[in-house]
Structure formats: structure tokens, C-alpha cells
Image (cartoon, helix red, strand yellow):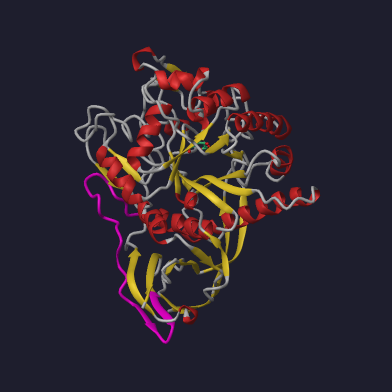
Amino acid sequence: MRKARVLMDRDFAIGHTDPRLFGAFVEHLGRCVYGGIYEPGHPSADAGGFRKDVLGLVKELGPTIVRYPGGNFVSGYNWEDGVGPVDKRPARLDLAWFSTEPNSFGTNEFMDWCKAAGVEPMMAVNLGTRGGDAARNLVEYCNHPAGSYWSDLRRAHGWEKPHDVKFWCLGNEMDGPWQMEYKTATAYGQVAREAAKMMRWVDPTIELAACGSSARNMPSFGHWENTVIDHTFDHAEFISLHTYLNNYKEDTAAFLACPDLMDSFIDEVVAIADAVAAKRRSTKRMMLSFDEWNVWYRTRRKRADRVREGWPVAPPILEEIYTMEDALAFGGACISLLNHADRVKSACLAQLVNVIAPIMTETGGPAWRQTIFFPFAHISRFGRGKVLRAQVESETYDSSYYDPRGAEELSFPVPNVPYLKMSAVADESGGLSLFLLNRDLTQEMEVSLDARSFGRLAVGEALELRHDNLKATNTKDAAERVKPASLKEVTVEGGHVHATLRPASWNVVHLSAN
Ligand code: AHR
């Protein structure tokens, strides 16, 4: 049995979770839109063609903001193709995913879907094949009330009121050669700055995120952030980060360690952003938008998993089937995000439905929860509030994480990985939520946590996600093979919380003020 001790005080805080930390992502990619959130003709579809079974699961999952329409897709997207009478919209070849985009779902449909799902829209603009002009026109179309060409066009299309989109991404992964018209850091920085200026001149209330590196292992990482932040410092509030965790090597210990590299990535981007601020003697602090994160590797490297020949509409690509083990690594990533609540003010689980997603559907059939659904639903439900600076005393292990870049076989050391990875969030009603990942694959862990500063606490809900088989998945026919159960061994005595965590488990303990 391993032992871990946690010290904390309710007044020692990292920061408050911004509601937008619990975001997700919908891209025109595979069956995310068509056959995912939108499927007219499905038995559960509403008048707008939105699948109500999916909407139900989205509400249970609890995303707060949803990024759209890409991803790689956005770098070749003409937003004008997706508005106006549906029968007049053009079908286009999408060079991001080698599919045909019918454009029957576009900006206005997305806004309606967001309302139905109870989420805020986050829009990305095309700074690949297009630029500042198309971007400012889209802001005018979406946010200007009336009396101008683009706002009146929106009204003529049937949306009288502005959509009032507050959060805008200045392109997507502009550092990556796979991106349509990727750029050098300087070229992107200039385009992003000019687009940002014009977009904000149209609507001064918007917030803007510039593209950071598409991964920590990019050769330009660091230099890219430094240059892009330098160009956009006065015009953007956020710099973005993307990370997809992998277990190519079938090394579970390394896989569960790798969320710690997300911690490093965040700390490094914060350091660069603050260095740029320091050079300017500026008190402004650029915030971080972790606008793509997830586990993704099985359907990533081989072209056949990403591309179906013949330019199909909504092919079933990137349909990663998640295991129990993936849910654990994913839970580790959730903890990394929570523990940086002071600077990561926005984050998007990529993606929402079918494409590397917590929710799967069968076209014309049912919808179900993948394993990764649960840690996200838990943090969205219990993770709102003040994240505490917990000091964790836990035995550690050393690891090395394989993170290839194209044909390059790269590995990164991950030293001193605590078996216990955790986050503690104090809520407004005096309660406390604990997210506890036991990364030991064979041993139970006895956790003792000093919560005396909270006064009297009582165990409210205590949940555990684990399975004897780390490769267990949920499928259409076994949709509940992996699901949370109650965590039995939790007690509170004299202000100390004691919990016994089973090997390789994700655990949530919500304590209410008593
Ligand atoms: O989420 C899938 C893809 O991953 C996105 O389109 C892209 O931005 C990233 O490379």
C-alpha cells in the first residue's frame, strides 16, 4: 500500500477557475458536425436537425464554451459559404481532411446549436487562405446589431439579433506545415495583429487568442511564442496551446506521467509571455487558452485513419475508441488544467462528438459515452471555484515519454512523477472537491489530507472510475462497461480526509460544509 499526504489551507489559492476552462471543440471534420451534433432525419432530431440524444449527453458532459469551425478546417474555410439559403450554398473540397464540405451547417446553425446546448460560442477565423478582411467581416456579420452590409445580411438570413460572440481565435496552428498557408512566426504575428486590430475596431468587447505552438515538441516552440506574443501583445488577451497525449509505446506508466509535461508546457508559455511583458515594463498578463487538448494517437499517424479516398462527405475518420487507461491520462490532463487556473483561463477538449470525442454516435442510431467522458464531466461539475495550492507528499517514479514528430522519434524525460496527481477546489458554499489520480498500476494508495482549515466537512459524493482491464472501452453494445462507481473508503475525522484509492484509478471526492 502506498501512502500520500496532502497539506493545504483554504486561503492558499492558485486562482479561480474561469468558466471557460471547461470548453470543448466542434470542427467540420469527419462525423463531428454531420452525423454528430447535426443529423436531420435522425429519430431524435429537432426542427433544426440537431440530435437531441447528443444534446442530452452534451448537457451531462457540461462544456461551457465550444470552439468552431476548426481546427485545420478553418484555414481553408470561406465562412460566407455557410450562411444564407441552404440550397444555394456551395459544396467545397476541404483540403484539411480531404473531404467534401456541403456547407449545410454553418455559422448561424452553430449559434442556434449553442443556444440549444446552453454553451457559449468560440469562433476561429481563417488566417490561412484568408486574412483580416474576411475576419472583420465575420465579426460584423455576427456581432454588429444592424445598419451595415454584413449585419443586415445576417438579418436577411433570418437572425435578427446579433450573436454577440465574445471569444475569437486568430487562426489555427499556424506554425504547422500541415496547415493551409502556415507561416513563419513573424509573418503570422503580423497577420494576427492586423486582423485583431480590425476585428476589435468592429466590436471592442471581443477577446482574442493568438496561435501559440501546435505542440510542445514543435521545433519552433519557444521562438514562436516569443515572436507571436511580441507582435500581438497589445491586441490579444490569450495565447493558445495544443496537446494530444499518446501511448504509442504501450507504456502505461509513461502515458500516465505525460500530463506532467502539460504542466511544464503551461509554465514555459507563461514564462515567455511574462518575459515579453517584462521587456515592455508592462503589467498586462497574457492568459492562456489551451484550445485543443485530449488523448489522440491511434487514428493519428496513418494517412488511412485520417483520409478516406474519393472526397466523401463526413467520413468516419479520427474515431478514436477510448480505453480506461486513456481516461486516466485524460484525468491527469484535467488536473493539470485546474492546477493552472491562474493563467489558463480557457481550454477546449478536442473534440466533442465522434472525432476524438467523449461522445460517440451511430449515424441513424444511438449515442453513448466514451471513457474520457467521465473525468471531464466531473471537473465541469465539481471543479468550479478556488483551486488550492496543495502540497502533495507522494512517492515518485522516473519516466520517459515518447512523443514523435513526423518521422522523428522524440523522447522527453519526465522525472519525479508523483504517484498521486491531484487538484483541490474550494467552492463558494464552503465545500471542497478533490480530484485524485492514483498512477500506481498495482498498489492501492492511502491518502491523508489535512482539511482542518475548512472547519467541519462531510463526504457528499465520492466517485471512482476504474476497471480491471485497462484496455476496457465503451461501445454501442456495451455502452456502460466503464463508468463511475461510488468510492467507498472515504472518511473525515478531525478535519482530516482519509481515502483509499485503488490502483490505476481516477477519483472524485466532494465534501460539503457541515
Ligand atoms: O483536433 C484535430 C486536429 O488537431 C485539429 O484540426 C488541428 O487543429 C489539430 O492538429
Specify the quadrant of the image occupied by residue 120. top left
Left/right placement of residue 293 relative to residue 48 reads right
Residue 198 in percent (x, y) is at: 64, 28
Residue 49 in percent (x, y) is at: 28, 29
Quadrant assignment for the N terminus: bottom left
Residue 505 visible at all: yes
- Which residues fall within the magenta stretch? 471-500
Along the line of sight, the residue nearer the viewer: 55 or 139: 139
Residue 323 in percent (x, y) is at: 37, 52
Residue 216 lies, with reference to residue 164, above or below; the image says: below
Name the residue located 46 percent from the left edge and 56 percent from the top edge. Answer: 329
- Furthest residue to the front? 147
Name the residue located 52 percent from the left edge and 64 percent from the top edge. Answer: 387
Instruction: Tell whether position 360 is magenta.
Output: no
Left/right placement of residue 192 relative to residue 260 reads right
Name the residue located 51 percent from the left edge and 64 percent from the top edge. Answer: 386
